[in-house]
Image (tube, rainbow, N blue to C red):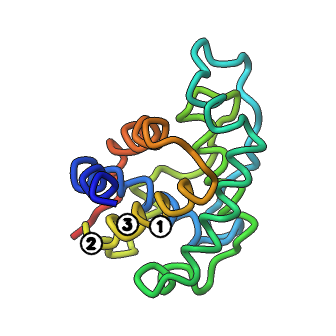
Amino acid sequence: MKNRFLVSATISSSVAMTATVVSTLCHSPASAQSTPSAPAAAPAADDDLFQSFGGRAGLTALTDDFVERLTVDKRTAPFFESVDKAHLKSQLTDQLCELSGGPCHLVGPSMKKVHASLDIGKRDFNALVEVLQDAMDAKGIPFSVQNRMLAKLAPLNREIISR
């Protein structure tokens, strides 16, 4: 437990991933104006992280659990009250797939645009990251693999945190 929160603090900017989720969840397919995702033209050269999550099926199972947890956690639930869960799960799965070196591609508006009106702070991001860590723990994803994904998500915080 101590290590988990150390990682959360060390990679607090990985909450940006959380913000990505929050943003995606807060917009229905119509309001997000995103187009369906499509596989990338060629598989990534290094898909080790993607494979460590169990490929597309593993990421889908993770995001299903993650989204359900986000909607019931008192810290994150308000961001997801009017969200199209199926759309959110699809977008989040594509994002994690792409970031992990899988053959997916997230299609839609920029992270900055999607999150601009949500007034997301660091505390909100940290809550999302904790919920993501809980979901990854529940799926038995090794700590080192979790950290590698969080490191991929961390740079997104600059596009998501607005306060």
Q: Nearer the viewer, mark 3 or mark 2?
A: 2
Per the model, the C-alpha gap separating discs 1 and 2 is 12 Å
Mark 3, other Cα within 10 Å: few <14 / some 14–19 / many ≥20:
some
- Where's the C terminus, which quadrant? bottom left
Whether the residues at callouts 1 and 2 have beta carbons within 8 Å, the answer is no
Q: Is residue 36 visible?
A: yes
Numbered circle sitting on residue 60: none
Question: In the rendering, at what x and y percent does residue 46 appear?
Answer: 57, 16
Q: Residue furthest top?
A: 45
Name the residue located 70 percent from the left edge and 37 percent from the top edge: 54
Helix, strand, or loop for circle 1? helix
Secondary structure found at label 3: loop
Q: Which residue is mark 3?
A: 116
Q: Residue at label 1?
A: 131
Callout 2, which amino acid?
Answer: Arg
Q: Nearer the viewer, mark 3 or mark 1?
A: 1
Residue designated by label 2: 123
In the depicted structure, whether residue 152 falls above or below residue 67: above
Q: Position of residue 74 (x, y in %)?
A: 45, 87
| Earlier residue among tags 1 and 2 | 2
Three-letter residue code for mark 1: Val
